[in-house]
Amino acid sequence: MSNSALLSTKANASSKKRNNVFSLLPSPSQSGSISAAKKILIPMVGIVVFLLMWSLAAKQVQTSLGTLPGPYETGQQFSGLVKEHFVSREKEEAFYERQEVRNQDKLAKDPNAEVRIRPYTGKATFFDQIATSLFTVAAGFLLATIVAIPVGIILGLNQGLYKAFNPIIQLLKPVSPLAWLPIITMVVSATYVSDDPMLPKSFVNSLLTVSLCCIWPTLINTTVGVNSVDKDLLNVSKVLRLSWWKHVRTIVLPSAIPMIFTGLRLSIGIAWMVLIAAEMLAQNPGLGKFVWDEFQNGSSDSLGRIMVAVIVIGFIGLLFDQGMLQLQKKMSWDKKQELR
């Protein structure tokens, strides 16, 4: 065999080996599938480990009401709360149906009779309390955001104003909601006086407490984000002679969005924690009141129901954070930036 034929045979054999080796490596589509599987499996492993640790630890804790409920007992209590909610809805429907029948009979006897529908005053269910808390925290967070972002932009653009107001911000920022709540309650009681108020006083108290406590992270992060805009971008704005509003809209806000959303994510978490504490302390309707009522009830089911509330509170907080993260991904100009 000639040298050229021998070299050609070796080259072909080497090429086949390389092809065999590369065929063992995952393709890009396979890598994507593996990555997606990891995103699902790794959190699931963490959840399973948590549930096992919770189940084992709960059996070791004895309270005056019995053993601390584990995952299974908590699930049973959640199922019971779901059934109670549907039973309550059935009672509400029956209540309104009875009124409708009564009013129809009255109108049949006297077409000019005055009829009315009385509101249902049954006890709020667990899910009613969740809805109340969600509405309150959304309103308080929205109010804080509407104030914090514009004020943060103004302070970030004006160093004189920032130096003037920064001591006040730092003074009010660490004040506990438990300190704000009595003051807000007295102020609202003195100023919000009406025979037919548009909003319940309990709602206004919780809303203002939430807003006062969750405004600071967004305000501070917005100020820092605006103050950290790249100097080159500021120079471009000066060269183009942009108006104040256009400068803020096209230069400042896109650059400050990451910091603004960091503040918003912190604020929504604080708002949710503050609301639960405020509802417990002031006995305002919501999840906090549900927890406190069950604690005061002291029945054999109370611990399990409180544990259900704890899990639900944490789960809702997780949804808030992830929802804000997805909103940040959509609004951020840098789509390649890794956010988590």
Image: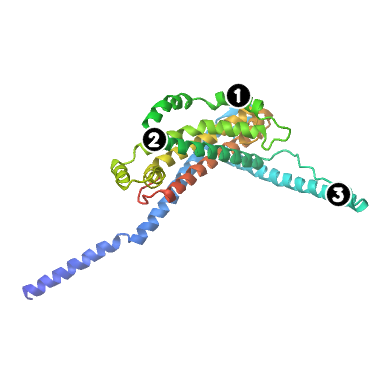
**Residue placed under numbered mark 3 in the picture:** 103
Counting other residues with Cα less than 10 Å from the Cα at mark 2, is it few (<14), some (14-19), or many (20 or more)? Answer: many
- Horizontal relation, residue 132 to residue 321: left or right: right
Q: Distance between the residues labelled 3 and 1?
A: 45 Å
Q: Is residue 311 above or below residue 184?
A: below
**Residue 153: in sight, yes or no?**
yes
Name of the residue lying farthest toward the bottom: 1
Q: Name the one closer to the observer, 191 or 334.
A: 191
Which residue is found at the position 39% from the left and 35% from the top?
A: 156
Q: Residue 236: where, in percent of width, then height?
A: 30, 46
Callouts 2 and 3 close, C-beta under 8 Å: no
Amino acid type, residue under disc 2 in the picture: Gly
Task: Name the element at disc 1.
Answer: helix
Compare marks 2 and 3 and give the one earlier in the sequence. 3
| Labelled disc at residue 295 | none
| Labelled disc at residue 156 | 2
Q: Distance between the residues labelled 2 and 3?
A: 62 Å
Q: Name the one closer to the observer, 339 or 69.
A: 339
Amino acid type, residue under disc 3 in the picture: Asn
**Residue placed under numbered mark 1 in the picture:** 182
Compare marks 1 and 2 and give the one earlier in the sequence. 2
Counting other residues with Cα less than 10 Å from the Cα at mark 3, is it few (<14), some (14-19), or many (20 or more)? Answer: some
- Horizontal relation, residue 229 to residue 109: left or right: left
Q: Is residue 42 above or below residue 308?
A: below
